[in-house]
Amino acid sequence: MARADTTYDLARFFTREGVAIYLAAGVGLPLLRDGHQARDHFLRAGETLGIATGVTEIMKYTIAERRPNGTDRKSMPSGHTAAAFAVATMESQFHPKEAPLWYTGAALIAWSRVDLREHHTYDVVAGALIGYGIARLELSQKHGLILTPWIGHDSGSAGVSLTGTF
């Protein structure tokens, strides 16, 4: 019985405190260690996290799939997983040698969501693809997707624009 309790405790940690620490580190660490690129990396990681979260929230209400534990109809896709993979992809781009660490953290968060019966396996796969895809789209743009005036510009301009190549 102790093994099951330990697994449950680990899953709860990665779903609660762990995901908060992971996301804060993924967005905040660039400010502490990325030198002259600190501001841009911080903004791009935050932007990617925000977009991934927004996309998954819209999809949850549109799809309305029941969770495996039956609590509500917000199972598809996993927002925790999308956020974690968005951050993992950004940090892996900024610090390629750390990619295994970031993706392992994201995978543990995804595992916790399935283990706790908050999501089906396909929900976390969809979340991972969304997070990864949005991060890759963000990285394909020279100055980000939405925060364009503040990423890679020193002009002091203000405003918001949405750009993308389709």
Image (cartoon, rainbow, N blue to C red):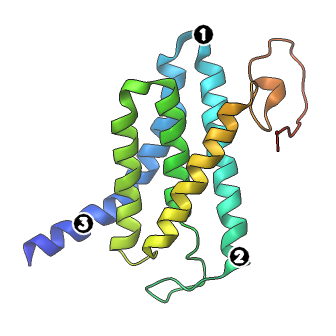
Residue 16 in view of the camera: no
Marks 2 and 3, Cα distance to the nearest angstrom?
29 Å
Q: Which residue is mark 3?
A: 9
Marks 1 and 3, Cα distance to the nearest angstrom?
40 Å
Name the mark on residue 36: 1
- Split into 4 quadrants, where in the image is the N terminus? bottom left
x, y (%) of residue 61?
71, 76
Q: Residue at x 30, y 65 (%)?
A: 11
Please tell me in which quadrant of the rendered image residue 157 appears: top right
Total count of labels: 3
Q: Which residue is mark 2?
A: 61
Q: Residue at x 57, y 85 (%)?
A: 72
x, y (%) of residue 132?
56, 47
Residue 156 in view of the camera: yes
**Farthest left residue in view:** 2
**What amino acid type is highlighted by mark number 2?**
Tyr
Q: Which structural element holds mark 2?
A: helix
Please tell me in which quadrant of the rendered image residue 108 appears: bottom left
Q: Nearer the viewer, mark 1 or mark 3?
A: 1
Q: Which structural element holds mark 1?
A: helix
**What amino acid type is highlighted by mark number 1?**
His
Q: Residues within 10 Å of mark 3 (few under 14, many from 20)?
A: some
Answer left or right for 162 relative to 76.
Answer: right
**What amino acid type is highlighted by mark number 3?**
Asp
Q: Earlier in the sequence, mark 1 or mark 3?
A: 3
